């Protein structure tokens, strides 16, 4: 989902970001990588900037998933084009999988197989876009929504996530921002970039707020079930009787296979408030344009879902929880960085810079470029996700790798500490 090909308008020479709509995570991290000192004493690069854990042996997918793909490929039956909406067997398997979290059964006809969650985002924004429309996005959030809205001439309006309240949604802000032209409210749970996991009560309040302002919800659940804190993962689709929910997700994160690009766009609308023949036809036409994942990957979906054992999921959550705790505890020892909340889910957390305790650092972008150059550590500047002078840390890496990266981060902060203020 973070492998975006758009060009960025960030220049590492000026350390300036022209506009949030021009930012891509891949673009920023690429520039940070280019800024790393390549001298003789070059150290191993430690990337804590992107949500792809597959480079690390502790985060490899299950054998059941690999065997399912190999079997699908060797059958020699899935080398041609798939239907634009996805293979029927894949749509049925995804519908059954998601129905486990719902009080009703999804129909396979409500499921559209996409090339990762990124294409699902694009479809959602594109089919809803209309003249003079606006969309409500979380701040901080995921920049692909901003890019897709810009391409479709949809105005972006930001509602804040509240760090003092475990990154809960500012419901009053949604009421103030929404109007008759609001096409959707985007809710990301488990959260990226904040690592929040919302409670049943809070999700219900979000749904009731969406109903009050007469709009639907785009529920980004790409990190679905990756919850390891106090709150269990609750699917937003559970509240689709209150307001229609468009659920976006993929196998990428839970199965640790982001490169397989198997995602979905799902209509949760038991009262048929949103779903109509016209809407369905529009979605199908958009799928005709975009295409979907490789056919043999789609064919493997039923077996991937059915054959994966719970032990695999438990081990992943155990490792993520361990790394989340390491990250939180190590950050406590760095005076210029504050972590308001432990991560409760996904693979990330947000931390705040205190620039008054640093010298020669102008903002979060300057911090990340100098950190990359001096310590060969990559972090994502908060500006990339809509929150200036914050940082996003991705902790889905080997624990020793994480500890080394955080140790270098601490050394960097000490070296740049404003001793006058510190004393």
Image (cartoon, rainbow, N blue to C red):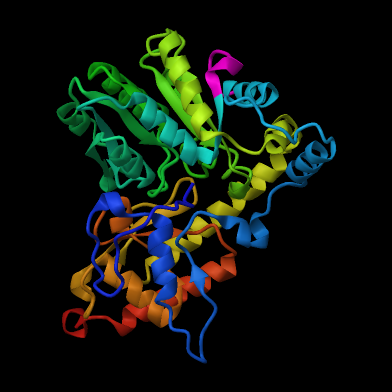
Left or right of residue 251: residue 390: left
For the record, the magenta segment spans 100-111
Q: Nearer the viewer, residue 285 or 18?
A: 285
Q: Nearer the viewer, residue 194 or 24?
A: 24
Q: Nearer the viewer, residue 3 or 281?
A: 281
Left or right of residue 422: residue 304: right
Q: Main secondary structure of the magenta part?
A: loop
- Give residue 124's position: percent from left, percent from top: 41, 29
Q: Quadrant of residue 331?
A: bottom left
Q: Is residue 57 above or below residue 211?
A: below
Which residue is located at x 58 percent, y 65 percent? 399
Q: Is residue 51 above or below residue 176?
A: below
Which residue is located at x 47 percent, y 84 percent? 38
Which residue is located at x 58 percent, y 48 percent? 258
Q: Residue furthest right?
A: 75
- Give residue 177's position: percent from left, percent from top: 17, 31
Q: Is residue 141 above or below residue 182?
A: below
Which residue is located at x 42 percent, y 64 percent? 29
- Give residue 99's position: percent from left, percent from top: 58, 20
Is residue 109 covered in magenta?
yes
């Amino acid at each position: 989902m973070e492998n975006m090909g758009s060009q960025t308008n960030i220049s590492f020479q000026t350390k300036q970001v022209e506009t949030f709509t021009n930012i891509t995570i891949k673009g920023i991290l690429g520039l940070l990588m280019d800024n790393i000192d390549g001298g003789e004493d070059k150290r191993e690069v430690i990337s804590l900037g992107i949500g792809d854990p597959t480079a690390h042996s502790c985060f490899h997918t299950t054998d059941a998933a690999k065997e399912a793909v190999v079997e699908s490929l060797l059958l020699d039956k899935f080398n041609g084009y798939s239907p634009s909406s996805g293979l029927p067997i894949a749509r049925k398997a995804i519908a059954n999988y998601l129905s486990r979290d719902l009080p009703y059964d999804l129909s396979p006809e409500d499921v559209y197989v996409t090339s990762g969650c990124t294409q699902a985002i694009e479809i959602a924004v594109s089919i809803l876009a209309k003249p003079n429309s606006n969309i409500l996005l979380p701040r901080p959030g995921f920049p692909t929504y901003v890019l897709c809205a810009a391409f479709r001439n949809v105005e972006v309006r930001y509602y804040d996530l509240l760090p003092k309240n475990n990154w809960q949604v500012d419901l009053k802000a949604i009421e103030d921002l929404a109007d008759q032209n609001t096409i959707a409210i985007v809710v990301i749970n488990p959260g990226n970039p904040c690592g929040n996991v919302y409670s049943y009560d809070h999700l219900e309040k979000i749904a009731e707020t969406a109903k009050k302002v007469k709009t639907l919800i785009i529920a980004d659940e790409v990190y679905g079930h990756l919850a390891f804190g106090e709150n269990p993962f609750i699917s937003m689709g559970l509240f689709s009787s209150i307001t229609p929910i468009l659920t976006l997700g993929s196998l990428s994160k839970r199965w640790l296979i982001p490169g397989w690009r198997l995602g979905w766009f799902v209509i949760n609308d038991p009262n048929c408030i949103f779903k109509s023949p016209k809407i369905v036809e529009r979605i199908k036409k958009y799928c005709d344009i975009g295409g979907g994942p490789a056919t043999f990957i789609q064919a493997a979906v039923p077996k991937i879902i059915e054959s994966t054992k719970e032990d695999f999921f438990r081990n992943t959550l155990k490792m993520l929880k361990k790394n989340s705790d390491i990250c939180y505890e190590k950050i406590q020892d760095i005076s210029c960085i504050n972590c308001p909340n432990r991560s409760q889910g996904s693979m990330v957390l947000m931390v705040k810079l205190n620039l008054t305790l640093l010298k020669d650092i102008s903002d979060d972008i300057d911090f990340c470029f100098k950190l990359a150059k001096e310590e060969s550590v990559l972090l994502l500047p908060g500006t990339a996700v809509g929150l200036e002078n914050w940082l996003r840390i991705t902790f889905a890496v080997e624990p020793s790798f994480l500890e080394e990266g955080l140790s270098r981060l601490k050394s960097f902060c000490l070296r740049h500490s404003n001793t006058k203020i510190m004393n």
